[in-house]
Amino acid sequence: MRISVIGCGYLGAVHAAAMAQLGHDVVGVDVDPAKVDALSHARAPFFEPGLPELLREAADTGRLRFTTDMGEIAGAQVHFICVGTPQKRGEFGADLAYVDAAFDGVMAHLGPDGVVVGKSTVPVGTAERLAQRLTDAGSTATLVWNPEFLREGFAVQDTLHPDRLVYGVPAGEAGERAKAALDEVYATPLSEGTPLVVTDYATAQLVKVAANSFLATKISFINAMAELCEATGADVTSLADAIGHDARIGRRFLNAGLGFGGGCLPKDIRAFMARAGELGVDQALSFLREVDSINMRRRVRMVDLAREVCDGSIVGRRVAVLGASFKPDSDDVRDSPALSVAAQMQLQGARVVVTDPQAIDNARAKWPDLSFAETAEEAATDADVVLLATEWTEYRELNPEKLATVVRSRNIVDGRNVLDPATWRAAGWTYRALGRP
């Protein structure tokens, strides 16, 4: 099948390469010439495990190409809209300018039986509005909403072998035709038994933001428990283990620490709240304000812990921050808790040095006033305190005896609760962590 993918950022680049790998003839379109050039030469413009190999394999088949020319999508049967929906400046709501621009571009080249597939995370009601535009233009093309569920660091796996597929389709014959087209697109994962949910536009749009809101709530719940643990002397990690054995709760996403960041969860829950307000049901999601607040408080508490181990002041103290990306196996620094903590400490007078295996360039572009190091050892040299802020494997496996040879003071704050306190304390370190005694 001939497919176009509009927007070749994180979502679109992975989707385009995966669709080619599944046997389709794919053209990816983006407005950024540098990004298009990189992808055209099978170079990933961002760090994502497995994507470089997927791009090379797809390129070798001759079924994948990238361009800045929207006219190249003419003749494609299915058009995927994969552009970003960032948070509006100064507001909670989502900025749909990129979605609308992509839709305008697709409409100009739609065939009579074309299928437009929205994958971007949008406020409920967006699909209905776009579908009405097709009707008003007299188009016989059909809009489908097919939300994405990618996890950074696992995006290739999540696209080729998704844990579920969701189609939001209109009623009647048009919806049946559109479903058949998507079934052909996803024939391989469907043949592997991937669950399929076929529903209406509104439900399909709500799935992604509802899922992200639930995960954010679970993370903030255990971080709220961490605050109580610190006040009572309890251990939040043991608490999470104990309640996680309850099958109704589960242990995943019950890891107390610096909380969530990135380009999805924070902006998605805020846009969800904003849309609920527009619909007059803002009280239904009022709890998400506290979820957001708890998440942001963890960053402040991380700074407080560093100050405590530095005898009450971080002014003039050298602080090593291990991690810049918002999560491991990614170079994404959008709303990164690690960088937020680093910037707060520098503003409060500390001399901060940040390191990360993949995200230094992106971090430097966002926070040029911070200092950066290539390795954990370099960052920790003469440090008064070391902060583990992103749980990269190489930081989890640090040797406390070896690291002790370069620091000024053996103080470590474990912002992700991934280190063994006994091991570090046995090596002479003062170990502190969020929610642990």
Image (cartoon, rainbow, N blue to C red):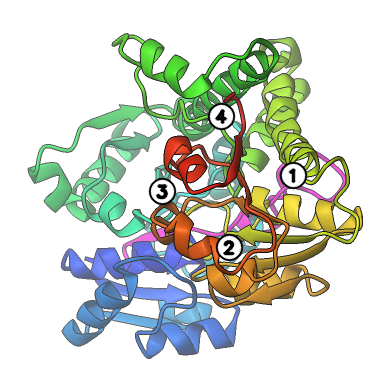
The kind of secondary structure element at disc 2 is helix
Residue marked by disc 1: 306
The kind of secondary structure element at disc 3 is loop
Between 288 and 284, the one nearer to me in the picture: 288
Q: Is residue 103 left or right of residue 173?
A: right
Nearer mark to the viewer, of 2 and 3: 3
Q: Are marks 1 and 2 in contact (CB under 8 Å)?
A: no
Tag shown at residue 121: none
Q: Determine the CA span between mark 3 and mark 4.
A: 14 Å
Looking at the rendering, in which quadrant would you find the N terminus? bottom left
Residue marked by disc 4: 216
Label 2 or label 3, whichever comes before in sequence order: 2
Q: Are marks 3 and 4 in contact (CB under 8 Å)?
A: no
Nearer mark to the viewer, of 4 and 1: 1
Q: Quadrant of residue 286?
A: top right
Residue marked by disc 2: 102
Does the magenta portion include 97?
A: yes
Say what amino acid the circle numbered 4 marks. Answer: Ala
Q: Determine the CA span between mark 2 and mark 4.
A: 29 Å
Between 35 and 75, the one nearer to me in the picture: 35
Q: Is residue 370 visible?
A: yes
User: At 24% from the left edge and 50% from the top edge, which residue is drawn?
Assistant: 181
User: At 75% from the left edge and 34% from the top edge, which residue is drawn?
Assistant: 301
Label 3 or label 1, whichever comes before in sequence order: 3
Q: Determine the CA span between mark 3 and mark 1.
A: 30 Å
What's drawn in magenta, residue-wise?
75-99
Label 1 or label 2, whichever comes before in sequence order: 2
User: At 79% from the left edge and 46% from the top edge, which residue is drawn?
Assistant: 310
Residue marked by disc 3: 151
Say what amino acid the circle numbered 2 marks. Answer: Ala
